[in-house]
């Protein structure tokens, strides 16, 4: 296993053992067969309980606290796989062969080269913008630069500004000397080839492009926010290592690379969550995958969804110390306020992702005083919540409760926790959009009309004392 990360694999397999032991009493899922539509389901507000489509991409078992990607249990994927393999699996339905994986990795590095898109970002106050807004901006620039979805006669702006000296831009391949010069002169030809592959902004190539590009944009936002210049990916590094390298200019240790890789695997897909649904709704109108991913980014930002991981850290700072947890929680509970990082629409058991992230957070916090303090508060809060709301309302830690401690121990700022979630979830968004478009039907739920009927039109001068319904 890669450089001294066997402990991480052991930690994940222990979490799997524990999960199986603690949930073996839960009923086995009634594995459904293909349905004969239309089907009956009991629907609550916010489409709770509604079944919108069939899928083979992933399965969330809320009773048992299971998460499965294309049939593989999340614990096994975290223990043995990589984010490149898992995103390929989600998108293409099978784990890649060695040849497919090599080609996919090369493709991701190639697509992560979006210097012109990043250059456009430089004309925005990125360091002051919400990083999720920067991600959305970046996906729109990528759409503009690499696809001709708007017009057949779309001509890429051939005025290519030299982005920066080559030292900060490791080449996709590392040609030297005269060969390198040819490489540079072939840039236009190379980029035209990419554009031809991406043309319609809707196929698998566009999904790969977004998977790589959103990571590049996020890393660029982190560099600009820290007062640096965006970096290009190093073709020798893995996706997870490149993400960290492009964010802070340092090649991560094997341990940091492994931890980030596990975090990316854990966040990649999760059923019909709000951001996945948002991207599918946009795609179902036959808009394109770039705008669909932009919609997913927008939905994920909300603190009830992916934005919770950042709010959890704010909550730890508000609590202050482990000793203050009990009093803080009692106050919140009495006010019936929601505790960030807890509860889930589907999981009425431990979120399996929290089962991996909690020991990871503990492992990492042993190396960081700030992390150690946070982990102590988190553990104390978990005990308070699970011993009360856990039994009363099946409220348990979710994916967002411990992830922030892991990222904090890696030196990542809280405003980049949700963007990292988005980088990973591009895999799930694009996989489910592509699958749904195979049998597309525009999403169009209904609303219960409770308003009035047959009202007389009131002329302007007679208005003012109308009662709202
Ligand atoms: C993600 O859907 C996904 O799969 C999402 C996600 C993914 O991978 O895509 O898993 C990622 O979004 C995780 C969730 C991150 N959000 C948070 O941690 C924010 C805090 N959690 C809550 O806002 C809430 O639990 C939700 C939004 C996650 C789920 O809310 P629901 O299903 O709409 O539940 P609800 O609001 O109907 O609550 C039911 C009861 C209520 O009590 P009563 O009114 O019945 O007395 O449970 C209570 C709620 O008050 N409750 C909580 C609580 N969450 C629910 N009470 C305290 N703290 C909480 N966190």
Image (spheres, helix red, strand yellow):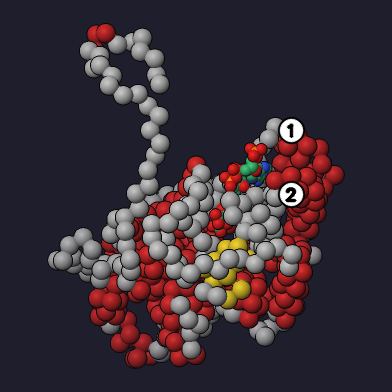
Residue 149 appears in the figure: yes
Is disc 1 surrounded by few (<14), some (14 to 19) or many (20+) residues within 10 Å?
Answer: few
Query: At 25% across and 71% down in the image, what residue appears?
Result: 199
Query: At 70% across and 63% down in the image, what residue appears?
Result: 26
Q: Count the labels in the image.
A: 2
Assign the N terminus to one quadrant of the image. Answer: bottom right
Q: Is residue 265 left or right of residue 156?
A: right
User: Which of 84/43 is in front?
Assistant: 43
Q: Is residue 451 left or right of residue 5?
A: left
Residue 53 spot, x, y in % from top left: 42, 61
Q: Residue furthest right?
A: 323
Task: Name the residue carrying label 1.
Answer: 334
Q: Give residue 390's mark.
A: 2
Please determine whether, in this image, residue 210 is positioned above or below residue 315. below
Residue 348 spot, x, y in % from top left: 66, 54
Kindly state the secondary structure of the residue where label 1 is placed: helix
Query: At 49% across and 47% down in the image, what residue appears?
Result: 43
> What is the quadrant of residue 79 in the picture?
bottom right
Q: Give residue 443's mark.
A: none
> What is the quadrant of residue 2 in the picture?
bottom right
Q: Is residue 217 left or right of residue 154?
A: right
Mark toward the start of the polypeptide (1 vs 2): 1
Residue 72 spot, x, y in % from top left: 58, 76
């Amino acid at each position: 296993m890669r450089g001294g990360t066997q402990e991480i694999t052991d930690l994940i397999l222990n979490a799997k053992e524990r999960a199986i032991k603690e949930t073996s009493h839960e009923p086995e899922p009634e594995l459904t067969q293909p349905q004969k539509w239309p089907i009956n389901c009991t629907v609550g507000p916010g489409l709770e309980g509604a079944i919108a489509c069939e899928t083979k991409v992933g399965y969330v078992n809320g009773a048992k606290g299971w998460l499965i990607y294309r049939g593989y249990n999340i614990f096994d994927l975290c223990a043995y796989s990589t984010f490149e393999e898992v995103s390929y699996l989600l998108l293409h339905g099978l784990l890649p062969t060695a040849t497919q994986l090599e080609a996919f990795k090369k493709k991701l590095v190639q697509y992560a080269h979006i210097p012109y898109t990043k250059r456009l970002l430089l004309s925005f106050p990125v360091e002051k913008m919400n990083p999720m807004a920067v991600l959305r901006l970046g996906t729109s620039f990528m759409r503009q630069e690499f696809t001709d979805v708007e017009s057949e006669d779309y001509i890429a702006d051939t005025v290519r500004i030299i982005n920066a000296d080559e030292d900060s831009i490791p080449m996709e391949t590392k040609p030297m000397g005269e060969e390198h010069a040819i490489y540079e002169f072939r840039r236009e030809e190379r980029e035209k080839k990419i554009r031809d592959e991406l043309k319609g902004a809707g196929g698998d190539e566009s999904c790969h492009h977004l998977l790589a590009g959103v990571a590049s944009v996020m890393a660029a936002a982190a560099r600009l926010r820290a007062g640096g210049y965006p970096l290009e990916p190093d073709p020798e590094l893995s996706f997870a290592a490149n993400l960290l390298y492009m964010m802070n200019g340092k090649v991560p240790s094997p341990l940091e690379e492994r931890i980030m890789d596990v975090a990316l695997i854990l966040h990649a897909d999760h059923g019909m969550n709000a951001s996945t649904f948002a991207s599918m709704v946009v795609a179902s109108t036959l808009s394109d995958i770039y705008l669909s991913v932009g919609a997913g980014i927008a939905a994920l930002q909300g603190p009830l969804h992916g934005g919770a991981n950042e709010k959890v850290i704010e909550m730890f700072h508000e609590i202050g110390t482990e000793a203050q947890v009990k009093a803080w929680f009692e106050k919140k509970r009495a006010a019936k306020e929601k505790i960030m990082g807890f509860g889930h629409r589907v999981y009425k058991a431990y979120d399996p992702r929290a089962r991996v992230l909690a020991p990871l957070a503990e492992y990492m916090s042993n190396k960081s005083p700030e992390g150690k303090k946070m982990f102590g508060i988190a553990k104390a809060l978990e005990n308070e919540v699970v011993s009360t709301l856990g039994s009363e309302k099946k409220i348990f830690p979710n994916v967002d409760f411990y992830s922030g401690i892991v990222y904090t121990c890696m030196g990542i700022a809280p405003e980049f926790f949700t963007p990292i979630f988005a980088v990973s979830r591009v895999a799930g968004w694009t996989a489910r959009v592509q699958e749904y478009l195979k049998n597309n039907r525009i999403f169009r739920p209904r609303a219960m009309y409770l308003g009035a009927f047959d009202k007389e039109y009131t002329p302007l001068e007679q208005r003012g004392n109308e009662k709202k319904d």
